[in-house]
Amino acid sequence: MALKDHTIDSTKISEELIESIITERVKYDPAKETIVLLPAVRSLTNDKKVLLFLAALQGWRFLVKENTPSESASPTDITRATGIPGGSVRPLLRGLEDRKILIAVKGKYELPAHNLGRVRDIITGKGNQSEVHTSIHKHDKNKKNIKLNSGVKSSSNRPLASEAFEKLLKNKWFKGGKTLSQLKDKLKEIAVIVPMSQLPQYLLKAVGGEDPKLERKQEMIGGKKLWVYYQNTKND
């Protein structure tokens, strides 16, 4: 028996796997280079919709020989195709990447061909249904733990982010104008570590309402247009 007797046609296997995944769930529109999810997909969970869409992207190479559409997609692409909100898509993708079902390259996600069988079993209900959900719940739990610990360290009685922010308002720290970056640095200085993405909620709350504590203006700083927050002098 020669080595050639032990070879397989991986291309044919991939095409057959993709077909088994998308049948009655997906249609291709080569003219517009779009993938259409059929009504049957509505009953699928969000994680399965994501996997289905990424599996369908793998099928383009069998349909379009020249200028083949990309087999990877950004979270925005996936949101647009599946209708799943971006805030839900990103944790799903990170969880699937953690389980090594997907790979991520430069902000885009792709389903490797060697995982097509695994995805087929997940979508059709033949595989381990808990593996995707376990990954997602684990990722969400870790994310919640990070948020819980972002405002205070357990080893000391340091102020929470909301308390520290209120104290800055009371002391008129924003007098003269402060940027988002300066606020982050100030909080860090007093041992309150808060991700930059969480700071706008405090600022916008202080700007809005019937009795705003702050007002904001867009200004050019370092060649960039930034929001600058000022103490509202009307409250003095």
Image (cartoon, rainbow, N blue to C red):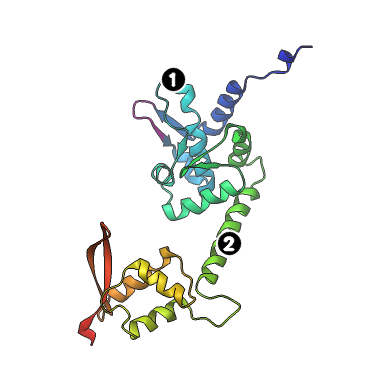
Task: Name the amino acid type tagged 2.
Answer: Asn
Residue 172 in percent (x, y) is at 31, 83
Front residue of 57 and 155: 155
In the image, is residue 34 part of the stretch drawn in magenta? yes
Q: Which residues are magenta?
A: 30-35
Looking at the image, residue 2 lies above or below residue 63: above
The Cα–Cα distance between marks 2 and 1, rounded to whole angstroms, is: 43 Å
Q: Quadrant of residue 230?
A: bottom left
The residue at the point 43 percent across, 81 percent down is 163
Residue 83 in percent (x, y) is at 41, 47
Front residue of 174 and 111: 174
The residue at the point 49 percent across, 33 percent down is 56
Whether residue 202 sits left or right of residue 147 in the image: it is: left
Whether residue 230 sits left or right of residue 165 in the image: it is: left
Residue 142 shows which numbered tag? 2
Q: How many marks?
A: 2
Identify the image quadrant of the C terminus.
bottom left
**Magenta stretch: dominant SS?**
loop
Front residue of 78 and 3: 3
Mark 1 lies on a secondary structure that is: loop
Residue 93 in percent (x, y) is at 52, 48
Mark 2 lies on a secondary structure that is: helix
- Report which residue position mark 1 lands on: 65
Looking at the image, residue 47 lies above or below residue 12: below
Q: Earlier in the sequence, mark 2 or mark 1?
A: 1
